Image (cartoon, helix red, strand yellow):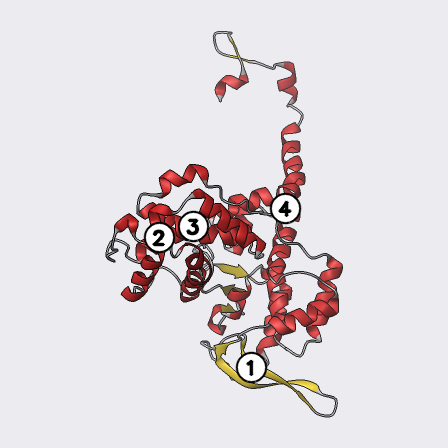
Amino acid sequence: MSQTSFVRWFSDLGLNDVPLVGGKNASLGELYRRLSEAGVRVPTLAAKSHRIEQLNIDKHLKPTFGSLLLIDVTADDIAGYQKDRLREGAAPKTINLELGTLRAILRRHRIWANLQPDVKMLTVRDDVGKALTVGEETRLLAACGKSRSRALLPVVTLALNTGMRRGEILALRWTQVDFLSERLTVGKSKTEAGHGRGIPLNATALKVLQGWATNFSDRKPEHFVFPAERYGLAGDNETPHSHSLALDKPLGTLKEAWESAKNKADVKCRFHDLRHSACTRLVERGVPLPVIASLLGWSAGTTVRMARRYGHITAEAQRNAVRELNREPQSDDRQNPATTNERGSSVSRSSTF
C-alpha cells in the first residue's frame, strides 16, 4: 500500500467526524480507541488491506506511541521506533508504511510539519528479488510436477509465462479464460492499472490451462480455475490423491507444496520472483517497458522504478537505438552540407527544427 493510501485511509476513517478530547493533547491510544468505537469502515481499501493496517496499528504503533500525547511525539521517538523494528527483522519498506500511518495522524493535527525536517524515512531497495536461471527454472518445474499438489505445476507455469501475481492467479475464474481468443482477463489486482487487464496466452500457458481444464468436465464459468481441494495418499504406493473439491471456492494456499518443491529443486526464491523472472526475460528480449507495464499491471510510479531497476538490461537496447542515428548521410548531403534558399543564402539544416 502506498504512503498516499495511508493518508487517504485516515481521511476515510473520518478524523473530522470523530470527536477527540484535547485535540493535540489527545494520546494516540485515545485516537485508536475512539476510531475503533466509532466502528468506521474503510470503503477505499480491500478487506485484506484493512486487516493488515489494523494489525500494524495494534501490534506495532500502539505499543510504542499509544501512551504519548500527539504533541509529545518527537523525531527521536520515531528514530527509536525505526531502530527497534529493524532489530526485530522488519523490512525498511514495512517500517516506512507503518510510519506513514503515524505521519497521517500528526499531519492531520498540524504537528508533522515541525517534525518532518528531522525525520528520515528508511532507504528502500528496488533491486530485491532474483530472476531464475534456465537451470533453476527447469529443476523447479520438475519438482512441481512431482508435488502432491496437482495445482502447483500449472500455477507456477502460468506465473512464469504471464508474470501474474499469485493472488491474481488463485482468484481466476473460468469466465476470465478465453480459449478461443487465447487470452485471459485479470480480475482484482494489487493496482488499479492491473485490474481488468488482458493478457495474451503464449503456447505454454495455453497448453497448461487446456490440460488443467480437463480435470473439471462439469466446470461452470463462475467456478474458480484453481478451486479449493485437499490432498491425501491413496493405495499401497501412497499415490497423492485430491479430495473434498469445492469448485466455488479458491485454493487457499500453496505454501507447503511450494516450499517442498523449492527444497527438492535446490532453488532459493520467492513466488514473486517468478514474476520478476518473466519481466527480466521480456526486457532482455527488447520488449518496450510500456508494453511490459501493460502486461504486468504496473502503476505509473512502478513503471518509473522498474526503468531504473532494469537499466542494466536495457543498456544494450540503448546502444542499438543510437546505432540507428549513426547512418551515413545521403550522397547529395555530403556534397552540400547546407541547403540554399531561392536567394542563394546558405541555410543550415538545423534551422528547420
Q: Earlier in the sequence, mark 1 or mark 2?
A: 2
In three-dimensional space, the C-alpha distance between marks 4 and 1, rounded to whole angstroms, equals 40 Å
Q: Type of residue at label 3? A: Gly
User: Residue 114: x and y, percent?
Assistant: 37, 38
- Cα distance, mark 1 to mark 2? 38 Å
- For image coordinates 61% across by 75% down, the residue present is 151
Q: Are marks 2 and 4 in contact (CB under 8 Å)?
A: no
Name the residue carrying label 1. 229
Marks 3 and 4, the one that precedes in the sequence: 3
- Nearest to N terminus: mark 3 or mark 2: 2
Looking at the image, can residue 298 be seen?
no
Q: In the image, is 240 to the left or to the right of 52? A: right
Tag 3 and tag 4, C-beta contact below 8 Å? no
Kindly identify which numbered label has been placed on residue 286.
4
Q: Residues within 10 Å of mark 3 (few under 14, many from 20)?
A: some
Q: CA distance from mark 3 to mark 4?
A: 37 Å
* Residue type, mark 2 in image: Arg
Q: Marks 3/1: CA distance? A: 39 Å
Residue of label 2: 8
Residue on which disc 3 sits:
100
Secondary structure under the numbered disc 1 in the rendered image: strand
Q: Nearer the viewer, mark 3 or mark 2?
A: 3
